[in-house]
Image (cartoon, rainbow, N blue to C red):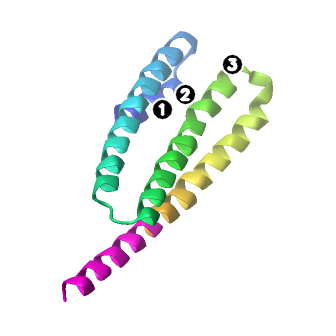
């Protein structure tokens, strides 16, 4: 919540305060990534197949890349003002990727989890 609120404030505030809010948002982004890594690491430890492990790693690394594009676009817009069009393209690609790619990764991971549970249930019978 702090990351999002300070990120929005960084976009709305004037020059000196926008950078303060951006730094706070970027720092809290690190905490979000750490929490996500701990969650995925726990899932990897409980996974039974190589495909599931690879899929979880792929989800984490693509999420880090996609989510990092939002602060990168903000920095491009603030630091290199003549690249405003590049920032817009980065935001569009980030939004699309965050919604479609991340959702697809999560759905695929759920399908793998269901398949693993079925296999374990069949082995128990």
Q: Are marks 3 and 1 in contact (CB under 8 Å)?
A: no
As measured in the structure, the alpha-carbon distance from the residue carrying label 1 to the one carrying label 2 is 5 Å
In the displayed structure image, the side of residue 40 where residue 78 appears, left or right: right
To which quarter of the image does residue 121 belong? Answer: bottom left
Q: Nearer the viewer, residue 106 or 123?
A: 123
The span picked out in magenta is 108-125
Q: For mark 3, what is the residue? A: 79
Q: Which numbered mark, 3 or 2, is in the foreground of this view?
A: 3
Picture disc at residue 8: 1
Q: Is residue 115 magenta?
A: yes
Above or below for 64 versus 110: above
Q: Are marks 1 and 2 in contact (CB under 8 Å)?
A: yes
Q: For mark 2, what is the residue? A: 11
Residue ID at (61%, 46%)? 94
Picture disc at residue 39: none
In the displayed structure image, the side of residue 122 where residue 81 appears, left or right: right
């Amino acid at each position: 919540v702090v990351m999002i609120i300070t990120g929005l404030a960084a976009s709305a505030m004037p020059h000196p305060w926008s950078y303060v809010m951006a730094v706070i948002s970027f720092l809290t982004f690190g905490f979000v990534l750490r929490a996500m890594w701990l969650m995925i690491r726990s899932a990897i430890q409980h996974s039974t197949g190589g495909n599931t492990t690879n899929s979880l790693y792929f989800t984490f690394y693509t999420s880090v890349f996609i989510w990092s594009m939002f602060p990168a676009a903000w920095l491009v817009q603030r630091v290199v003002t003549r690249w405003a069009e590049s920032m817009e393209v980065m935001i569009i690609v980030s939004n699309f990727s965050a919604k479609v790619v991340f959702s697809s990764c999560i759905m695929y991971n759920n399908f793998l989890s269901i398949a693993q549970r079925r296999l374990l249930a069949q082995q128990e019978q």
